[in-house]
Image (spheres, rainbow, N blue to C red):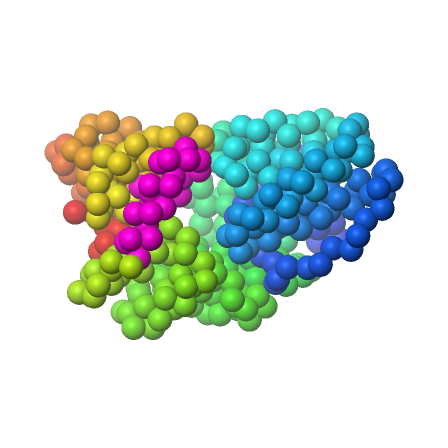
Amino acid sequence: MRRPVRAALGASASTLVVLACATGLLALGPTESPALPDHAPTASLAHSQRALKSIELARSTLDESHLATAERALARSLALQPRDNYTAVVGSGMLAGARHDFAASRAHALKATAMAPDRAPGYAVLADAETQLGHRAAATAAVQRLLDLAPTSSAYARAAQELESQGRTDEARAALERASEIALNPADASFAALRLGDLDLETGHPDRAVRHYDRSLAVAPGNAYAVAGKARAKAALGRTQEALRLYRKVTERTPAPRFLYELGSLQKKLGQDPRTAFAALDAQSRLALAQGGAVDPCLGLYQANHRDPHLGVRLLRAEWQRRQHSSVADALSWALHRAGRSEEALEYARRATAGGRRSADALQHLGAIETSLQLPSAAHHLRQSRTLNPYLAPEESAR
């Protein structure tokens, strides 16, 4: 009998390691790949595995140069074995997802699951793609199939993301605790601890979040996501100098939009000079506009709150065409509101909180938009946001 996601939390561990998490498995560092012989299928598989390692490195380090390495390795694998090359098809789906081409990622994943309906990796890629495309029922089905086939640490991490999107935070926490318990390698253990920290921070427990981020860093030192999460938690606790130190540390090595946005916003709040962080975000905004590629929602939020809300709308509309994820809906709603288009913003704000999703940021944005439109539901949503996370940073709260 098919197990629901909730019941699957009691499943036993499997030795099969599923490749890639919702935001990428964390790598401890780059590894050298030996020279490979040019005969199939052994060489084909080795090239595919090299590609998977490169994609993992790109996600953990936020260094896109690893994606080009992955693309070359996959092309070589498929040249050597153009048919029945399951690992290369899965890798192609992961590569497309890393580049935010989630429609292509989904197509590769569907091909992989058709090739091997009882192998787990294809469903991991499919779950990620369906989630980013906003296909809620399909994402749930893919996660459930993944759990049925291989209830591993990364499968439980995906289940937690799905449960959280439905507002089932207690169950999401249980899934992440299970993911932590059965982790078979440092990458899985670090990721589970990271996500537990994120969940605690989102639900108003920054002190607990710090401990989880420290656990993540203990097994994956230098993990940028955990360093930034710890900075976020320290800022929520009012330990702003510690937060600034951590933000400077992570942005020097990994100048990702979210990290720069949070650093600059905190500096501005404290009366410090945010020009360095903001200049980097301006440059990234211009590049995203010129290249027409993937847009981090935080670039749109930065423009909405600090620069040009209309440019924020333009950037986020382009990203919305690529993926109808709740995070994009939330950022687009706020950019539209800041651009004076609150009626249009309301549709996206409601989409960002649909399905029971309990995000303090999204609820705060929804409440602010409803306030501007004099809707009676505004007070309820603002109260929900404050209850969920009383530590919500002023820079991210409604103005």
Q: Is residue 56 magenta?
A: no
Where in the figure is residue 165, as x and y percent of width and height? 44, 41
Look at the magenta stretch and give its main secondary structure: helix
Where in the figure is residue 328, as x and y percent of width and height? 37, 37
* Total marks in image: 0
Vertical order, 224 against 321 (above or below): below
Q: Residue at x 48, y 31 (%)?
A: 133
* Along the viewing direction, whichever of 77 and 100 lies nearer the viewer: 77
Look at the image and tell me in which quarter the N terminus lies. top right
Q: Residue at x 22, y 38 (%)?
A: 309
- Residue 368 found in image quarter: top left
Q: Residue at x 50, y 52 (%)?
A: 62
In the image, is 230 to the left or to the right of 397? right
Where in the figure is residue 38, as x and y percent of width and height? 84, 42
Where in the figure is residue 23, as x and y percent of width and height? 52, 48
Vertical order, 65 against 112 (above or below): below
* Along the viewing direction, whichever of 101 and 346 lies nearer the viewer: 101
Q: Residue at x 37, y 52 (%)?
A: 258
In the image, is 43 to the left or to the right of 205? right
- Residue 159 found in image quarter: top right
Q: Is residue 178 visible?
A: no
* Along the viewing direction, whichever of 235 and 380 lies nearer the viewer: 235
Q: Is residue 281 magenta?
A: yes
Q: Is residue 57 visible?
A: yes
Q: Which residues are magenta?
A: 277-300
* Along the viewing direction, whichever of 122 and 75 lies nearer the viewer: 75
- Residue 188 found in image quarter: bottom right
